[in-house]
Amino acid sequence: MVGRTGPQRGIRLAVQQNSSEAVGGLLWQERAACRGPLGSVFFPPPTSERKREKLAREQKAKNICLACPVMAQCREYSIAIREPHGVWGGLSEKERRVLL
Ligand code: SF4
């Protein structure tokens, strides 16, 4: 998830910037479909969410990922840095954990 607004997005950007050298740069982020206000569905809300709400939110994020021109790069990056939070490259937190 790239280009998110709000505090959670700021955290993600900080992580990405700190890790960019290790993953070979992050120019792909400029083409991310999740830049801007759509980014709010990629992370859980600050308050709790029910399982059904979480699944619906994650599915919305994954649908955005499916139309994203940099999904492969994003997925590879999120796995490389072992990103623990949010939907990245069409994969939820739980789905990425299986791959690690
Ligand atoms: S694949 Fe999904 S999370 Fe990654 S940059 Fe594209 S829209 Fe954002």
Image (cartoon, helix red, strand yellow):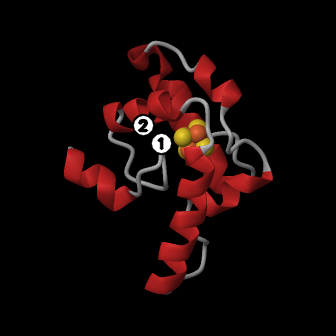
Displayed-image quarter of ligand 1: top right
Q: Is residue 45 found left or right of 89 in the rendered image?
A: right
Q: Quadrant of residue 92?
A: bottom left
Return the residue at label 1.
89
Nearer the observer, 8 or 55: 55
Mark 1 is on which residue type?
A: Gly
Residue found 47% across the figure and 27% down from its top? 73
Return the residue at label 2.
75
* Relative image position of residue 72 (x, y in whole percent): 45, 31
| The C terminus: image quadrant | top left
Q: Are marks 2 and 1 in contact (CB under 8 Å)?
A: yes
Q: Callout 2: few (<14), some (14-19), or many (20+) C-alpha neighbours within 10 Å? A: some
Q: Callout 1: few (<14), some (14-19), or many (20+) C-alpha neighbours within 10 Å? A: many
| The N terminus: image quadrant | top right
Q: Is mark 2 within 8 Å of ligand 1?
A: yes
Residue found 66% across the figure and 34% down from its top? 32
Please determine whether, in this image, residue 78 is positioned above or below residue 38: above
Residue found 53% across the figure and 65% down from its top? 59
Please determine whether, in this image, residue 16 is positioned above or below residue 46: above
* Relative image position of residue 25 (x, y in whole percent): 52, 15
Q: Secondary structure at mark 2?
A: helix
* Relative image position of residue 9 (x, y in whole percent): 65, 48
Can the viewer see residue 63?
yes
Please determine whether, in this image, residue 76 is positioned above or below residue 27: below
Which residue in the rendered view is the most extreme toward the front?
67
Mark 2 is on which residue type?
A: Arg
Q: Is residue 54 found left or right of 39 in the rendered image?
A: left
